[in-house]
Structures are given as structure tokens and as C-alpha cells.
Amino acid sequence: MKAVTCKIFYIAGLILCTVVCIPLTTAPRSFAETATGSAVNITAKSAVLIEGDTGEILYEKGKDTELVPASITKIMTLTLIFDAIDQGKISLEDEVSVSEYAASMGGSQVFLEPHETQTVNTMIKCISIASANDAAVAMAEKVAGSEQNFVKLMNKKAKELGMKHTQFKNCSGLDDDIKSGHYSSAYDVALMSRELIMKHPQISNYSTVWMDSIVHKTKKGESTFGLTNTNKLVRFYDGITGLKTGSTSKAKYCLSATAKRDGMNLIAVIMAAPDHKVRFSEAQALLDYGFANCSVYEDDFADMNFEPLSVKGGIPSVIAVYPKGKFSHTFTSEFDKAKIQKKVLYHDVTAPVKSGTEIGSITYTYEGKELGSVPILSQQEAKKAGYTDFLILSIKKLFMVE
């Protein structure tokens, strides 16, 4: 009976996807202005477009409005799962046993049964492609012991990422509600989407899959269950890398769509769109705007020579320095690279100095406007010179041969 039920849901999913993938049309909409004055049609209550490398906001509409996020909640769930993999706490091959609680989840699900086991890899597939609530809860229990403990990690991570308008009450977004305290904002969703897609780009191996399947292995035997991606942009949008949809009667239709072209990563978030077609068409419009009008300038300091810096009263008296990371800036219109000016400033440095201490900066300007800066750090430590050190130094100078 379970196999028959799975096949019915699978066929229903295919029919729904065929209907949804009809060329997108939208009702008349108001125009919202971008930073450059270009018009983008947006009817969703909240939306934001950011560049992944720099985190710069390229478009916003009610970006901090606290709304019901539905299943885009799972972006944070996936982020913590991949964090746990990176930390060696779990691996893709690990077996995950499904609890009765996880199996009881309603809404979007892959109908996992109590005590059924699947690998972490399969669970990620179910969450990313089919937005499976049961798989999300099973993984939360795998990582943190319980969904409650996992939610604490979600909220901790949200604070670390600067998500000021977010609070999670569950790991799935199922039956979320503003009154219950489960909410987020378009900008916060963009922040956690950026963390996931930039820090864990392997998520694209799952989030861009259009159709797949899993095999249920239970006491009743084996049965195949089909998975169909809820993000329709993966079928046709050039450069799409993910990421996640969400919809409930309270949240309406939400989407975080990520794409990459010519080295530029864009993240478009749509929240509370009136219907499923609008969330896709408006996310596509934002991505199109970004790729058409924006470009990223990057500096890897290949043309710069960083001389050793003198340290007052230090042993050694000079230390090597280096810039922290690379510098990136997103231009929302054409720019002349030759007009970008770089200015290096060092602080007066007195010992002691620890390795990694900020001792200066590189500031970037374009036609008089400051674009940003990159810290310059000490590459080694310099201890504070004592009386003996000064005595030895004086003796060396005394006997120094020209």
C-alpha cells in the first residue's frame, strides 16, 4: 500500500510541475526602483538582491520586514548540516535513523517511516530537492540530539550572521507563525543563503537537481519514491545554483534563488508573493537585473609589494605584513578600472605585536567615493625588547663594519 501511495504522490507531483512550468505570466505590477534608477517589477511584500562575494545590497523592498518564512527556513537547517560535516561531526555516508517524531511531520515530506534508515547524503537530497520536513527533523536530531537543541544552534548561527530580524522555532518552517515567534526577513534570508551557497558550494549538487528518487527500505520491503525540485528555475535559468522555496497559507510564496555567471554570485530573495508564478518571475527579474547591470571588481594584490614594517622597541625590529583576504566591490553601472585608487596607511606600531594584529589598511576609492578597505595584518609577532636586547643591539652597532 505504501508503494502505491508513493507512486500516486509522484505522479501528482509530475502533473503539478508540468502546470507550473508553463511560461510565466504576471498580473499588472507597480514599479520599484533600484539603486541605479532601473525599474524592476515587484509585487511581493518583501524582496532583496545581494552579491554573494561582497554581500552588497543591489536591490531592496521592505528588506527588514519580519514575515513568515515557511520552508526557506531549511536554508539554515542545511547550513548547519554542512557545518557539521565540515567539522567532522557527521559524514555523508553516516546512517540516520528516523524517529517516530520525525516521521510524523506533515506538509512536504518523503514519507519516511519510524526506524527507517537513510544516509546523510540521501537526507540532504530529500531536504534540498523535495523540501522534506520529515528528513529535516531527522537530520536535526542526528546533528544535535533533538529538534529543540538544533533550533538553539539555528538561532545562535543567525546571530553570528547578523540576522537581526529572525527567530526560529523549528527546523522545517512547517506551521510557522509570527505569533509563535518563528519569523525572518528577506535580507536575513539572503544572509543565510549567502552563508550556505558561498561557504558550502556543494549544496548546488543537490539544489540544482530537477528530478531524482530515493529507495525506502523498511520491514515491508523496498519501494522507490520520486523527488521533484520545488524550485522551477533550475529547469531553465542560466547559471542557477539553487536554492530553496517555501510556501504556506500564512507565508504565501517565498523563494531564495541563487545564480552565478562570469564569476559573479547573485542571491535574490522573494517573500510573501501572491502566487507561485510571481515568486519565480520576480526572482528571475532581480537576477536578470543584477547580471545585466552589475559587475564585480576584485583585487588580489598581485601588483602590490608589501615592505616589512618597523616596530618600535620590538624584537625583531621589522615584521612581515599581509592583506587580509581579497578586496571585492560590486559596481551597479559601468566603471573604469584605471580610476580605482588604492591608498595604504600604516599605524604607528609599538611592541609587543601578536601575529595577525591589524597594523594598517588599504582603502579603495573611485572618483572620490570610498568603496571600502582591507585590513593589513602582521605576519609574525614582535616581542617587547628588554634591557639585554638593547645592550646586544648596541654592541652589534658598535662593532658593525661599514
Image: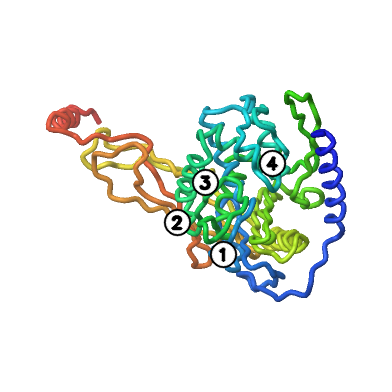
Q: Label 2 amino acid? A: Thr
Quarter of the image where the C terminus is located = top left
Q: Earlier in the sequence, mark 4 or mark 2?
A: 4
Q: Which amino acid lies under the numbered mark 4 shown in the image of this protein? A: Ser
Which comes before the other along the chain, label 2 or label 3? 3
- Looking at the picture, tell me which residue is in the foreground, 307 or 79: 79
**Mark 3 or mark 4: which comes first in sequence?**
4
**Along the line of sight, which residue is nearer the eye, 394 or 184?**
184
Residue 65 in the image: above or below residue 266: below
Residue 221: x, y in percent?
Answer: 78, 24
- Secondary structure found at label 4: helix
Nearer to us: label 4 or label 2: 4
Mark 2 and mark 1: Cα distance apart in space: 29 Å
Number of the label disc, if any, that sits on residue 204: 4
Which residue position holds label 2?
Answer: 363
Quickly name the residue at label 3. 326
User: Would you name the residue on which mark 1 appears?
Assistant: 63
Disc 1 from disc 3: Cα separation: 27 Å
Q: Quadrant of residue 399?
A: top left
Which residue is pictured at 54% across the width and 63% down the height?
Answer: 66
* Residue 80 % position (x, y): 54, 40
Which percent across, then down, holds residue 50? 60, 58
Which comes before the other along the chain, label 1 or label 4?
1
Closer to viewer: mark 2 or mark 1: 1
Disc 1 to disc 3: CB gap under 8 Å: no
Residue 249 bears which disc, if any? none
